[in-house]
Amino acid sequence: MHNPTDTAPKPLRAAAPAGPLTGRITVPGDKSISHRALMLGALAVGTTEITGLLEGEDVLRTAAAMRALGARVTKGADGTWQVAGRGIGGLVEPADVLDMGNSGTAARLLCGLLAGHAVFAVLTGDASLRQRPMRRVTDPLAATGARFVGRAGGRLPLAVQGAADPLPLDYAVPVPSAQVKSACLLAGLGARGVTRVTEAEATRDHTENMLRHFGATVRVTPQGAGRVIELTGQPELIAAPVVVPGDPSSAAFPAVAALLVPGSVLTIQGVGLNPLRAGIFATLREMGADITEENPRIEGGEPVADLLIRASALTGIEVPADRAPAMIDEYPILAVVAACARGTTRMRGLRELRVKESDRLTATAALLAANGIRCAIEGDDLIVHGNEGRPEGGGLVETHMDHRIAMSALVLGLVARQPVRIDDGAFIETSFPGFAARLNGLAAGAAMIAAA
């Protein structure tokens, strides 16, 4: 597995294609669902078969961690994955440090999983992940009886001593975060009684959907704009097949490329469209995007459809703060859209972007500024002034080891007047294996994305 700290950077360059982007593609499996399928499969009784698992490095780190905790995780010749679970309470103490690479989701969810098991483990990650805060999950999880000892600010490396008899949590999440909610629910699986998590704004509910899919009792009660989630502890989770839909966060990059490159017509097959996750597509439609859902269906408790996308003239809008939880990872690519739209786009309430793989809010503004695009940060808002067409481009973007900043900059290069370069794209593999090759395959002629 790639570790950005011990390999040479991979500079890339993206330039406008000679013609439109056309074709039918799939995107990698949903990363959030892939992590959860492996974790819950490891806690289930029996063998779970997973189809369409994202085989990026973040998810492979989770697979390795589940093996280290005693589950049997294998990949079949047909590409399906098998997870022979241990049952709740059945995880074993890992013999070595668990290296979560660049994955904040894996690290935070694993803190919840470990809190409910009487094992000792040490989590670490790459240079980027070791700078990211973990106390937002470890502070509430400590109420189970688990103990966490980390570096200043609770950062990795982090030692975890799980609780022998974990207590159920009753926790109100202070800032909308599916990771914090999910960590609390995973810890609650090992506790007697009901674990209750209250969120003021509804966040993505993949954990609740998948817990039900494996047989847990989960009750969700609306409360204002948010919800109260109650999990009955110590269920017997039963192995169940999981079909992982295409990741909507990954789909956003080729979708935006098709919207912005004139004349393009692109179909992205099998995209997950969970309404708590797919805010980017609602926002693009509000800006005037021609996006049609075809062949809608339900797979593994999640809504899925094929997306037909046609190049469109787009107009700047105001994106409300309450949409942030449903598209928190998509603001960098939305900023690229805003740069090509007519008028000004204001994205409100982006505080959560400051604690992603990088300070993603600052990094997004720097990406735009390096390419001649007028923008500003006001408080937690990002304001982008579009130029109704092709931005100037020509910049070198510092990616800060953030795969979404890297991919957003490369998509900008496909529509800018001058090619756009990034300092390093090696870690794009963490979430979208084969990203450059897949986009290059949509254009006739020379590769749009190539080594710089």
Image (spheres, rainbow, N blue to C red):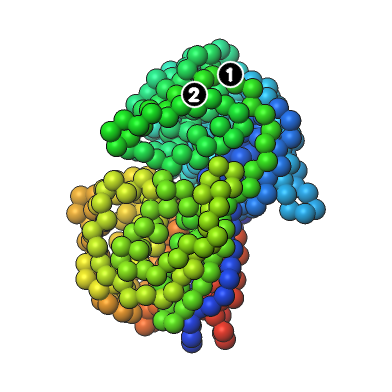
- Residue 52 located left or right of residue 255: right
Of residues 2 and 274, the one drawn nearer to the viewer in this rendering: 274
Q: Position of residue 396 (x, y in %)?
A: 40, 71
Query: Which circle marks residue 231 in the picture?
Result: 2
Mark 1, residue position: 234
Q: Position of residue 354 (x, y in %)?
A: 33, 47
- At label 1, the amino acid type is Gln
Q: Which residue appears at 33% of the width and 76% of the height?
A: 313
Separation of disc 1 and disc 2 at Cα?
A: 9 Å
Identity of the residue furthest to the left in this view: 378
Of residues 233 and 112, the one drawn nearer to the viewer in this rendering: 233
Q: Are marks 1 and 2 in contact (CB under 8 Å)?
A: no
Q: Position of residue 304 (x, y in %)?
A: 53, 53
Identity of the residue furthest to the right in this view: 77
Query: Which circle marks residue 438 in the picture?
Result: none
Residue 198 seen in the current view? yes
Report how many numbered discs are placed on residues in the image: 2
- Element under disc 1: loop
- Element under disc 2: strand
Mark 2 surroundings within 10 Å by alpha-carbon count, few (fewer than 14), some (14 through 19), many (20 or more): many
What is the quadrant of residue 24 in the picture? bottom right
Q: Is residue 71 above or below residue 104?
A: above
Mark 1 surroundings within 10 Å by alpha-carbon count, few (fewer than 14), some (14 through 19), many (20 or more): some
Q: Which residue appears at 21% of the width and 67% of the height?
A: 344
- At label 2, the amino acid type is Leu
Q: Which residue appears at 48% of the width and 82% of the height?
A: 20
- Residue 114 located left or right of residue 360: right
Q: Which residue appears at 32% of the width and 49% of the height?
A: 323
What is the quadrant of residue 391 in the picture? bottom left
Q: Position of residue 182 (x, y in %)?
A: 48, 33
